């Protein structure tokens, strides 16, 4: 099947042969072409005012823009139950940490997710995922971490596997058993860590239920030393690392991520800036979650100026979850990043396409509009890509292509 997308006012390529675009890297994002030829699942070529014969379908994009399919590289999409009560508590002045210490937070979602059956969890997750696809997400990472015990973690990971089978988009799974300390191990954290490193991680790797291992490295959750032990077990079993690092306060998360050459270090509100150089050297992606800070009323922010000076690679994700970020819109996260972190449109567009593709080991196939890559393409009714972040709330593309097929529009 050959398709031609014609009459585009901009093709935002977001391409760099290295597979990522660091901050401060002078890259031409927009191509000089105005049409894209797709053959089967791949991008065949970029063209200027092409001859329209020889295509099974010619689509007039009416001066809209084409951008790479969005990539959300940090979500907790598989869960049961909601926590709007906590959202209201925060509006009344309570903090995320204090709510968590008093029976709410992740532990509450763990209780609810343990109660849900696999079918129920699957059909709820499917509906959630459809909302991301509607908003142009063609690759997504999904974490476990609302089970903690063996059965529920595996139930979550199986749901992610079923989503992979059901949907055309790219889905990567991450084992986040170290999201909290389960109540049954509250006086034996070491025992739970041993259970993860010696039993869960080898099992999950053997069953190919996960692509990565993640740890919530934060005061009161897992220390840097504990995070290192858990992530090392992942590496030994062929699972690369991602880290929830230093969200509320510095907890050695950035240092562990630097030491273990993590694929991604996330949140990053209070890192040790001495780690930035090593993160750059290792091409670790710093995944920013500005919407989470917004929903949690957090006043801290990542050290953007230092990151720019050093030239780190950034991604922006939704962190979609029932507690700190009940948000379906990656574009809105980017806009919040623009307002609260002073990120610029050129930085934002790479942060939701090519850079998260790199952090998910997908950048040889997707994340940019380049001949030979998968045809993961969005067409938006916009004059230029800067308007993607500017028209807030209008986040639905006209068309979503995943591997050459229209999956929305
Ligand atoms: O990334 N910080 C830890 N984990 C999630 C929040 C999960 C929850 O509150 O349910 C996050 O923000
Ligand atoms: Fe998270």
Image: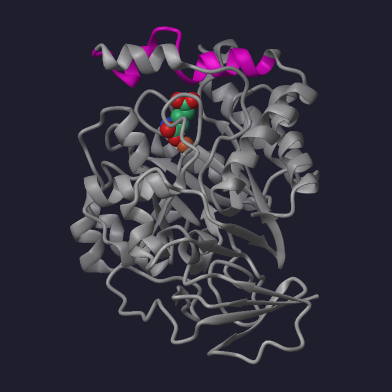
| Viewer-proximal residue among 408 and 52 | 52
Magenta highlight on residue 115: no
State the image quarter where residue 220 is shown. top left
- Coloring basis for residues: one colour
Q: Is residue 191 above or below residue 13?
A: above
Can residue 278 be seen? no
Tell me which segment is drawn in magenta. 93-114
Q: Residue at x 34, y 29 (%)?
A: 295
Q: State the image coordinates of residue 263 (x, y, percent, origin top left).
A: 50, 57
Q: State the image coordinates of residue 330 (x, y, percent, origin top left).
A: 45, 47
Q: Residue at x 64, y 51 (%)?
A: 239
Q: Is residue 355 above or below residue 206?
A: below
Q: State the image coordinates of residue 219 (x, y, percent, origin top left).
A: 34, 28
Q: Residue at x 48, y 68 (%)?
A: 64
In the orientation shown, which residue stands out farthest toward the top?
102
Horizontal arrangement in the rendering, residue 192 relative to residue 307 (left or right): right
Q: Is residue 381 above or below residue 151?
A: below
State the image quarter where residue 204 is shown. top right
| Viewer-proximal residue among 298 and 13 | 13
Work out which quarter of the rendered image holds the C terminus and state it. Answer: bottom right
Can residue 219 be seen? yes
Horizontal arrangement in the rendering, residue 88 relative to residue 398 (left or right): left
Magenta highlight on residue 101: yes
Q: State the image coordinates of residue 194 (x, y, percent, origin top left).
A: 61, 30
Most common secondary structure along the magenta stretch: helix
Work out which quarter of the rendered image holds the N terminus and state it. Answer: bottom right
Q: Residue at x 33, y 39 (%)?
A: 246
Q: Is residue 301 above or below residue 389?
A: above
In this rendering, the count of numbered labels is 0
């Amino acid at each position: 099947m050959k398709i031609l997308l014609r009459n585009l006012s901009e093709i935002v390529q977001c391409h760099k042969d290295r597979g990522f675009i660091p901050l401060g890297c002078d890259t031409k994002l927009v191509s000089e072409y105005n049409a894209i030829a797709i053959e089967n699942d791949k991008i065949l070529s970029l063209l200027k005012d092409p001859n329209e014969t020889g295509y099974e379908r010619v689509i007039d994009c009416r001066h809209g823009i084409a951008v790479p399919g969005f990539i959300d590289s940090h979500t907790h999409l598989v869960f049961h139950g909601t926590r709007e009560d906590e959202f209201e508590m925060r509006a009344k002045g309570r903090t995320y940490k204090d709510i968590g210490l008093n029976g709410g937070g992740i532990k509450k979602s763990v209780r609810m997710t343990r109660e849900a059956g696999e079918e129920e969890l699957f059909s709820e997750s499917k509906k959630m995922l459809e909302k991301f696809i509607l908003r142009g997400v063609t690759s997504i990472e999904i974490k476990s971490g609302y089970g903690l015990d063996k059965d529920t973690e595996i139930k979550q990971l199986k749901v992610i596997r079923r989503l992979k089978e059901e949907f055309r988009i790219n889905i990567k799974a991450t084992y986040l058993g170290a999201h909290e300390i389960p109540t049954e191990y509250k006086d034996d954290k070491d025992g739970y860590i041993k259970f993860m490193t010696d039993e869960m991680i080898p099992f999950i790797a053997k069953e190919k239920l996960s692509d990565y291992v993640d740890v919530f490295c934060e005061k009161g959750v897992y220390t840097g030393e504990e995070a290192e032990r858990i992530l090392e077990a992942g590496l030994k079993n062929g699972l690369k690392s991602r880290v929830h690092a230093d969200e509320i306060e510095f907890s050695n998360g950035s240092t562990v991520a630097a030491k273990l050459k993590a694929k991604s270090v996330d949140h990053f509100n209070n890192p040790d800036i001495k780690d930035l150089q090593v993160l750059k050297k290792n091409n670790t992606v710093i995944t920013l979650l500005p919407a989470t800070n917004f929903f949690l009323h957090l006043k801290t922010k990542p050290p953007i100026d230092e990151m720019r000076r050093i030239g780190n690679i950034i991604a922006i994700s939704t962190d979609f979850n029932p507690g700190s970020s009940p948000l379906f819109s990656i574009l809105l996260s980017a806009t919040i990043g623009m307002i609260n972190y002073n990120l610029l449109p050129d930085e934002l567009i790479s942060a939701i396409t090519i850079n998260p593709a790199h952090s998910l080991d997908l950048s040889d196939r997707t994340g940019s509009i380049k001949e030979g890559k998968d045809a993961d393409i969005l067409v938006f009714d916009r004059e230029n890509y800067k308007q993607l972040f500017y028209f807030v709330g209008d986040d639905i593309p006209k068309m979503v292509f995943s591997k050459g097929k229209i999956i929305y529009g």
